[in-house]
């Protein structure tokens, strides 16, 4: 692993010698793995100014969350959870589960509300069940979602401006964030690439994460729409902590122990 190359991915505060909290450091290591597919303990120890013992614990944690496979002296990328998959590919994964989650999520929407949908494939699955709603305003950065709803009587669609990301058919950037700061959203429905009770909802792309954070901040209630494959996985960065969630809608294959852990913290969980 090239230390100079690692520094290019580190935040300014880190390169200046500041320490990071454990979760932040692990997110940075996850990002480096996603970019380079391989890391070494000595280089990470020097980069983050922590002991090699601490780095080994970080790599063990990442391995336990199916992100890394430890090797002699370091680790390699283990799964595709850190990598960007095309929208069409993701849409086909867990299709039946997403359909059930989408139907359940739409049932939580009331006529006359202003809701936000992110650009996730699970949010897209909601759209067919929203078409019976009346006087509904849908704020979304997802182009596929906007196109699906644009000709539906009784539904107004607001798409914030921004830069188009072809991987997710989404709009991102400061323009979209500024629009979101000016609207009052009753409920936001957001998908994720990873979810755990500790890290909350996580995603793989930094700009997408920033836009999702803006959606979360603008909403009175935040509803996570995540199928079982997202539970226990970690992506690059957190955009919504657990305590910000009102409701999680998932499917019957979600790990029962984690579901109970979430419920014990006062978060409602629906099994679709």
Image (cartoon, rainbow, N blue to C red):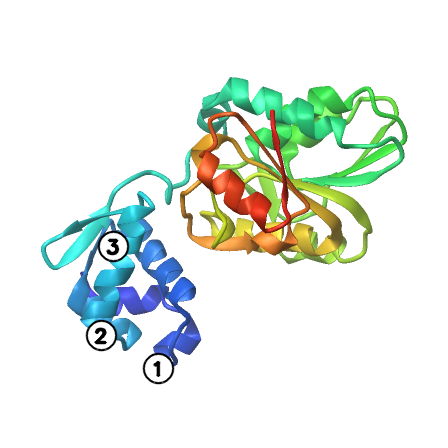
Q: Do we see residue 193 in this rendering?
A: no
Q: In the rendered view, does 92 fall on the left or right side of 264? A: left
Pick the residue in front: 89 or 271: 271
Q: Position of residue 122 (x, y in %)?
A: 58, 30
Residue occupied by mark 2? 51
- Whole-percent x and y of residue 201? 53, 48
Residue 272 visible, this orientation: yes
Q: Which residue is mark 3?
A: 60
Q: Nearer the viewer, residue 113 or 232?
A: 232
Task: Decide which of tag 2 and tag 1 comes sooner along the chain.
Answer: 1
Name the residue located 29 percent from the left edge and 60 percent from the top edge.
Answer: 58
Task: Say which element carries label 1.
Answer: loop
**In the picture, which quadrant includes the C terminus?**
top right
> How packed is label 1: few (under 14 Cα within 10 Å), some, or many (20 or more)?
few
Q: What residue is drawn where x is 73% and y is 27%? A: 106
Residue visible at 90% across and 31% down in the picture: 135
Q: Position of residue 98 (x, y in %)?
A: 56, 24
Say whether residue 52 is left or right of residue 230.
Answer: left
Q: Secondary structure at mark 2?
A: loop
Work out whether 215 lies above or below 16.
above
Q: Compute the Cα span from label 2 to label 3.
A: 14 Å
The residues tagged by marks 2 and 1 sit, at their Cα atoms, a distance apart of: 14 Å
Read off the residue under disc 1: 17
């Amino acid at each position: 692993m090239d230390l100079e190359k690692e520094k290019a991915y580190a935040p300014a505060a880190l390169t200046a010698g500041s320490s990071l909290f454990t979760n932040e450091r692990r997110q940075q290591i996850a990002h480096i793995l996603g970019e380079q597919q391989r890391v070494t303990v000595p280089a990470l120890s020097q980069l983050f100014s922590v002991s090699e013992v601490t780095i080994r614990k970080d790599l063990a944690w990442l391995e336990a969350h199916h992100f890394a496979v430890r090797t002699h002296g370091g680790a390699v990328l283990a799964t595709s959870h850190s990598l960007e998959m095309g929208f069409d590919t993701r849409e086909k994964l867990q299709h039946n589960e997403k359909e059930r989650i989408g139907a359940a999520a739409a049932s939580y929407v009331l006529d006359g509300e202003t809701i936000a949908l992110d650009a996730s494939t699970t949010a897209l699955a909601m759209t067919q069940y929203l078409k019976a709603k009346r006087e509904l305003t849908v704020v979304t950065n997802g182009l596929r979602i906007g196109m699906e709803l644009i000709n539906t009587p009784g539904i107004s669609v607001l798409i914030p401006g921004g830069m188009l990301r072809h991987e997710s058919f989404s709009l991102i950037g400061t323009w979209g964030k500024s629009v979101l700061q000016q609207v009052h959203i009753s409920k936001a429905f957001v998908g994720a690439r990873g979810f755990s009770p500790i890290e909350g909802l996580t995603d793989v792309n930094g700009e997408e994460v920033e836009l999702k954070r803006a959606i979360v901040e603008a909403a009175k209630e935040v509803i996570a729409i995540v199928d079982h494959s997202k539970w226990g996985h970690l992506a690059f960065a957190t955009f919504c902590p657990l305590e910000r969630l009102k409701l999680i809608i998932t499917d019957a294959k979600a790990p029962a122990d984690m579901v109970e852990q979430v419920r014990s913290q006062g978060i409602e969980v629906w099994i679709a």
